[in-house]
Amino acid sequence: MRIGLLTEGGYPYVSGDARLWVDRLVRGLDQHEFDVYALSRSEQQEDEGWVPLPPQVNRVITASLWTAEDDGVVHGRRARRRFAECYGELATALCTGTSGEPSAAEADRFANALYGLAELARDEGGLVGALRSEGAVRALERACRAPGAPRTAREARVPDLLAVAAHLENALRPLSLDWYEDDGLGAVDLCHATSGGPAALPGLLAHHFAGVPLLVTEYGVRLRTHYLSAAESSPAVRALLTAFHGRLAAETYGRATIVTPGNAHARRWQERCGAHRDKLRTVYPGMDATRFAEVGESPECADADTLVWVGRVEPAKDLVSLLHAFADIRKDEPKTRLRIIGAPSGPEGEAYLGHCRALAAQLFPDEADGPHAVGDNPVSFEEIGGPELPTLADAYAAGAVTVLSSVVEGFPLGLVEAMLCGRATVSTDVGAVVEVIGGTGLVVPPRNPRALAEACVVLLRDPERRARLGAAARARALELFTVEQNITAFHGIYLEIVSRTPVRRVLLDDAGEPLPFAAPAEAHVPGRWTGPTARVVARGGPTWAAGPPVRATTPIPATEGA
């Protein structure tokens, strides 16, 4: 079948989120064809280029989210009135959605406004300029000042309105793309959005315009990310943007045929945002287990007196609590060492790493065995790639116990890596940690250094228990979190969706007459199933039954259109 793969800030770019699992998915499903529709997040990401693409990727079509050029179209009176009605309805839906759960009528209002703007962009163009116009800000202001609007919306001032309008213009840029015709997403059998938010918008429009089924995969729920990142905005901005992202998430989950959360933590968020349970299929992210095989099969090589932390250095990882816990560990087990392995994440991570180094120097002055020996700090800060730790597997092999001390975590990939290496783990109870380890490691409350220290001491003193937990962890990871299980799950989901979706192609013969049985059920399977003279002219149902068919401007091969 032909898959329209929708990405944002990831595949096929060298850097970005979700790049690895999407690349593994595409390479693993080589029996299918993929058209990649990629939204980039920055100019730097575009300059870095793409990863090598396998032959099953037919084409890559890109657009940027970090900038959008006005197409120069100036709306006439009718188009301006049409935009004002749609944008006003959208703004009203956001204001009524800032307090309590939205009703079905309010959800319909948001959806009608969203698709109305998309239809305006397709018919008239000029949507980018309209979203940036003073009229958009005034429409937003009228909705906030309307009777019945909640207090948070009424309190919005001019800077708040400008900030919300700018955010909406950025988020709605996919509406202006020319991806939704019969030679684009209208020609695929299935749209697979690799995240929610902007990446799912093209899938919503392909479903709206052409009836293409939509599959949405979320390993990190975009609405949750918005909640965490919008803390510094004013209450009015937070309320309006939260309403927008919540409505968009609900519309995405409602229109999608199947939604695949990456864990139960994400699944709970999706259910809270309106996803129906019958649509949800949990599919864990797939890890490449081969690079950890050597370490996982020889756990005895670990240093029994060493704790290891591996990850990106940032405040959410709470290394401060880990260092304080290690101070308690050293009181009970003086020979223990702690290796913190990872690079800082951005300027904030650099500052946090400096703070942690200073704290380690304060808590653990360099110790020496004698008056003539060089002092040594029991805490070391290292990065992967040096002579001592050339690979990620070597990092986990450096210690007998792997520690996760985070206060915020989605799906803990580092924990899965440690499990594949056969390591016993001590983790804080955040995100999907408990779901991942499933009883093969110790779990303590977050921000509790004493509990973290006690759990580590228990495992340091019991090598047999460490070995049992490590073996059980590796077996669990190999069963649930490998690339193979991920690919198998998505292959089955693809077939399930397509088997439930009728073939919506209208084919004409040379005389221009419709061929109602020219697209059989097996048309989704690669191969030539229709005659060489048939041509695709539409998608979205048997429109020839209601009126004369519209000829396609460019003939499409029968195997591609079938």
Image: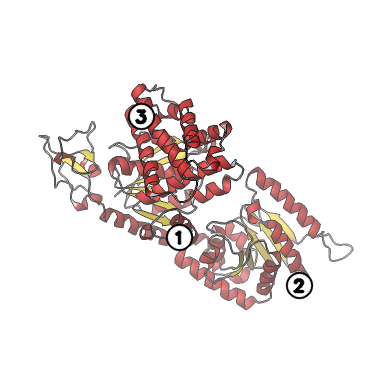
- Tell me whether the residue at label 2 lies in contact with that at label 1, contact meaning CB atoms closer than 8 angstroms: no
| Circle 3 residue | 82
- Residue 473 or residue 241, whichever sits in front: 241
Circle number at residue 284: 1
The amino acid on which the numbered mark 3 sits, given as a three-letter code, is Arg
Q: In this view, does 436 lie above or below 51?
A: below
- Residue 512 or residue 369, whichever sits in front: 512
Question: Which secondary structure, mark 3?
Answer: helix
Foreground mark, 3 or 1? 3
**Image location of residue 29, percent across then percent down:** 36, 53
- Quadrant position of residue 155: top right
Distance in Å between CA atoms under marks 2 and 3: 72 Å
The amino acid on which the numbered mark 1 sits, given as a three-letter code, is Tyr
- Residue 457 or residue 69, whichever sits in front: 69
Q: With 318 as the anchor, is 245 left or right in this view? A: left
Foreground mark, 2 or 3? 3
Distance in Å between CA atoms under marks 3 and 1: 44 Å
Q: With 403 as the anchor, is 324 left or right in this view? A: right
Q: With 140 as the anchor, is 522 left or right in this view? A: left
| Circle 2 residue | 332
Mark earlier in primary sequence (2, 1): 1
**Image location of residue 234, percent across then percent down:** 60, 40
Mark earlier in primary sequence (3, 1): 3
Q: Residues within 10 Å of mark 3 (few under 14, many from 20)?
A: some
Question: Which secondary structure, mark 1?
Answer: loop
Residue 423 in view (yes/no)? yes
**Image location of residue 322, percent across then percent down:** 69, 61
Look at 69% across and 49% down and name the residue there: 352
